[in-house]
Amino acid sequence: MERAFYLDKDKCEGCTNCMRKCPTEAIRIVNEKAVINDEKCIHCGECIRVCPYNAYNSVTDKIDDINKNKFSIAIPSTAVYGQFHIGTEICNIHKALLSMGFDYVYDESWGADLVSQAVKNRVRNTKDNRPVINSNCPAVLRLIKVKYPSLMENIIQLQSPMEISAILARKKAKELFGKNDEDVEVFYISPCPAKSIRVYSPIVLGPSKIDKVISLKEIYGDLIREMKMHHEICYSNPSIKGLKWSLSGGQCEAAEIEHGIAVSGIENVLNILEEIEMGKLNHIDFVELMSCNESCVGGPFNFENPFVAKNNINYIIRNTNDSNILIDDIDKFEELDQQGLFEQKINLGLRNTEGLNLKAAVERLEKVSQMVKILPKIDCGSCGSPTCRALAEDIVDGINTIESCVILKLKK
């Protein structure tokens, strides 16, 4: 899978909203329709969020894709719980998932609790490459790889909570139900396209332990209907530390980072990465970067307003008793850490470096610079490129012509 979403060209009006908001300039307007460059796309979901015509749709698995011959496990994102009104019992959300066809539910907050401890240890024990950058937002990882490759080595080499949860969920299937790994199928309920592409086309080394991804939008209606059948009084059993990962600043708080900052929203992330690259934040130990506003509660596959979802999550945190957690994995951190469970290797190589050389790169840069001098530099977007510099690059690369510049035509 190249992308976790697709563009319905029948709905696209070529309004340029998505092109202007794309942080990596991966979108162009060609013949009054948006066109996406898969090499530059980081799956942040900004195009989905800003399209006024709902022309972007998710490409994820469906409930019908559950294999009845396998033991199916659902891992709901911690952000899922913010999508329901205050007072909703998490155990009833789990029961609804079971009623929809899953055999077992493993809470991502449990995996996030464990990763918090791993982050705490790594940041304290590692003094190189300050600041350390979190590794659980796939869109941020891809953004760094595309635009800030010099910062790749700053990324903490740790598994994300969704992957740790999948690994431990498979172990539970064996311990509790006697299932072999090949008989188990793991589904992740995702708040965003970036988490989906992490599974289908990872930039980390090694395959994902998650088999399929379902967007929350895909099953939200079914969840609501099933939850009406499960409204009995029960208690929630997530990890409070883990739930904080769905909110901006939650990772820093859960990992007890003293000198850390949290940044959410792709434009803010771009700004802070510029400062890191210039060496302005070397005194900071840890930087939590999340591409969605307010972190995962702001994912484009969610339903609720991110600020309302944040309030819902905080209500759960305030009213959850840690003693009600029904999982023993959280107490096994030392054992799991010694097994190397949390280690992850990120592919630090750059894309499409084959055949490139310094001379060709310098020549291209000179041509682009010369073309920029000719263009009006007002970034109107009428040519189908987001900025005049982007148009200059497109002209040099042979995918557009200078005749597309409306301002130059008017001047002539």
Image: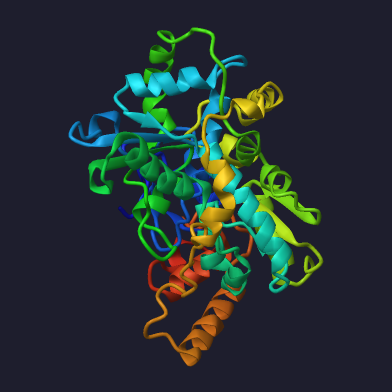
In this view of the protein, can residue 41 be seen by the observer?
yes
Observer-nearest residue: 275 or 331? 331
Horizontal relation, residue 227 to residue 386: left or right: left
* Residue with the most extreme left position: 69
Residue at 40% in and 63% down? 39
Image quarter of residue 411: bottom right
At a point 38% along the width and 14% down the height, the residue shown is: 226
Examine the image and state in which quarter residue 372 appears.
bottom right
Residue 381 visible in this rendered orientation of the protein: no
Q: Position of residue 287 (x, y in %)?
A: 70, 57
Residue 388 versus residue 255: which sits nearer the camera?
A: 255
- Looking at the image, what colour scheme do you see? rainbow
Q: Is residue 227 above or below residue 367?
A: above
Please determine whether, in this image, residue 60 is positioned above or below residue 149. above
Q: Which of 142 and 11 is in front in this view?
A: 142
Q: Position of residue 322 (x, y in %)?
A: 65, 29
> What is the number of callouts on the image?
0
Q: Residue at x 65, y 38 (%)?
A: 241
Q: In this view, does 214 lie to the left or right of 41?
A: left
Q: Is residue 274 left or right of residue 382?
A: right
379 and 142: which is toward the camera = 142
Residue situated furthest bottom in the rendering:
359
Residue at 75% x, 53% y is 257
Figure check: 343 above or below 58: below
Residue 35, how many percent across, how many down?
Answer: 38, 53
Residue 74: image x %, image y %?
38, 34
